[in-house]
Image: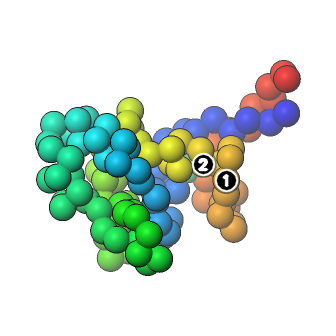
Amino acid sequence: MIKYECERCGKCCQWPGEVVISEKEIKAMAEDLDISPYDFTQKYTQLRSSRNGLTLKQDEKGSCVLLENNSCSVHSSKPQQCKDFPNKWRFKGWRQICEATPKKIKQ
Ligand code: SF4
């Protein structure tokens, strides 16, 4: 089985699309940034296009608002959706941009 090891190139964080976040994840990211969950929600989140929950804001180019100097500013508490890429889900054309290293793992 192949597992991709993230090289932290930051490219997936620049890929436009919604990052679905839960209340628990907001709490963890807020704690990481030493701000309140309310302030985090105000500053970094917006309503999903489906209006069903919140997503992280993006800049005008589609980059995640929490990407700082090409690095995730909440790496240790990042949402499950971010942790799961590219092993559990992928977007079309991901291999052209993602620098993750494929590693063979025993099952
Ligand atoms: S694009 Fe791939 S290697 Fe780069 S940060 Fe995302 S998962 Fe890691």
Residue 21 position, x and y percent, is 42, 54
- Mark 2 close to ligand 1, CB under 8 Å: yes
Label pair 1/2, CB-CB below 8 angstroms: yes
> Relative to 45, is 68 above or below?
above
Look at 30% across and 68% down and name the residue there. Answer: 46
Where, quadrant-wise, is the N terminus in this rendering?
top right
Residue 40 position, x and y percent, is 21, 52
Query: How many marks on residues?
Result: 2
Residue type at mark 1: give it: Trp
Residue type at mark 2: give it: Phe
The residue indicated by pointer 1 is: 89
Q: Secondary structure at mark 1?
A: loop
Quadrant location of residue 30? top left
Residue 80 position, x and y percent, is 51, 44
Q: Secondary structure at mark 2?
A: loop
Look at 23% across and 57% down and name the residue there. Answer: 41
- Identify the mark at residue 85; answer none if there is no mark: 2
Q: Residue furthest top?
A: 106
